[in-house]
Amino acid sequence: MPFIEISPCKKIPAAVIFPDVASQRMSVPPESRLAEACGLAHAINLDIAYSEIIKIREVKPAIFIGEGSLQRLIEAIQINNIELVIFDTSLTPIQQRNLEKKLSVKVIDRTALILEIFGERAQTKEGKLQVELAHLTYQRSRLVRSWTHLERQRGGAGFLGGPGEKQIELDRRIIDGKIIRIKKDLEKVRKTRNIQRSARKRIPYPVIALVGYTNAGKSSLFNKLSSDNVLAADMLFATLDPTMRKITLPSGKEVILSDTVGFISDLPHELIMAFRATLEEVLSADIIVHVRDISNPENKEQKADVIKVLSSLGLEHIEENPCYVEVLNKIDLLSAEQKQEINKQHKLGISALSGEGITSFLNILDNKLSSADKVFEIKIEAKDGKTLAWLYANAEVLSLKNEDEFIIAKIKIDDINAAKLKHRL
């Protein structure tokens, strides 16, 4: 449990450790994984005073790392006055407790670090509830058996909070009670979202959900398309709470654009489950746009991580689904040769910053949605010029046939305008 208070004026000196375990295959090089972990630490304003890749032949059940690495880390902590050590891996409660005893500083693992970032970033009531649920689920097994050696106090749901209730007083019964309460509150949120979706279906605007690895540029693309001002910073997990806006495509079709939380490798299971209410927006979307940072050397590995999370949500084989669209963002950072290679592969390259490729992207969305349009034959009075003009403006008129005082019109139309036409007739 947390006992370090983060001050906006003073950065906490921290050490970031990536244990490179020989028996564990990683999708990215250890150097990239360490850099990402440092980026996560920077996201909550920590001062990275020391970082190291520790090679491990075999994980030690008691302290995870070997004695030699432990002594080296103790020296680094003393030299750099480090107050917090982050292990970019999953630690058992016993390993975490033993490391804190040996190192005499606070120790957290990758899951705790990501939960801490989410705790800082959540703005809406729903987001805060989901983060708190994830915190409590993670902490539940650590409170009684493994954290009672800490006599410090804490407050709030974070791991780095200030003074508050004593650790020893937080037993499993209290945690379980809080989890039940939060789940009930989140169920109300889920019902509210279902009502909102039902309302959208009555005036059925198609939903386009932006997904992707954290910091891939989803929020920048969202801002470009919606002329909005969602936080789009060069940091991991800049966006946490989902944002939705109505935009108009080149055809005049109106759609709902949804910006979602970014994914990351080894995304904690607690977060996937806690944020399921939010991620249901992705599950119900008409089109899922996977935004990739093509300038990142590990973009293929990042793509695999995103596909893995989508699969865990129930979207298996998403790449084969016609509703899936992949865009390669940040092509403004590529060379001319790299851009040519993207074109040769018939992939869609865009820049949310400069606007390059955005028109082509919007046209693809238009075509995807139009492919779901329905074909009808309707009968209107020949003298009803207003309805005929409306059809040409809001549908694709495939053919017209005169029949006495009526016109039989064969049209291709989307659900929204079909509902408007039904009301008009």
Image (cartoon, rainbow, N blue to C red):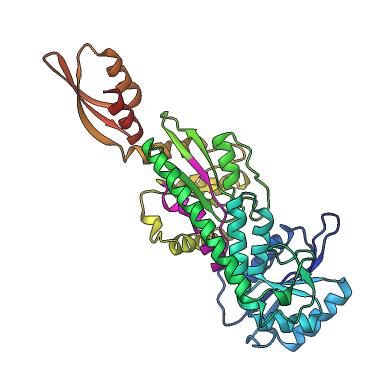
Please, is residue 304 above or below residue 104 in the view?
Answer: above
Q: Residue at 36% across / 49% down in the picture?
A: 322
Nearer to the camera, 31 or 403: 403
Q: Quadrant of residue 140?
A: bottom right
Q: Is residue 301 something that shows in the picture?
A: no
Residue 65, position in %: x, y? 70, 84
Image quadrant of residue 22?
A: bottom right
Q: Residue 67: percent from the left, percent from the top?
A: 75, 88
Choose between 373 and 120: the one closer to the eye. 120
- Is residue 282 shown in magenta? yes
Residue 277 on image: x %, y %: 49, 55
Number of marks present in the image shown: 0
Magenta segment: 257-285
Q: Quadrant of the C terminus?
A: top left
Q: Is residue 301 left or right of residue 383?
A: right
Q: Is residue 62 left or right of residue 323?
A: right
Q: Is residue 235 magenta?
A: no
**In the rendered image of this protein, does residue 137 appear above or below residue 355?**
below
Image quadrant of residue 98?
Answer: bottom right
Task: Give the residue drawn at x 63%, y 55%.
Answer: 237
Identified at 87% across, 76% down, the residue is: 78
Asked if residue 404 is positioned above or below residue 162 in the image, the reply reads above
Which residue reaches farthest top?
383
Q: Quadrant of the N terminus?
A: bottom right
From this viewpoint, is residue 409 visible? Answer: yes
Name the residue rendered at 87%, 71% in the picture: 81
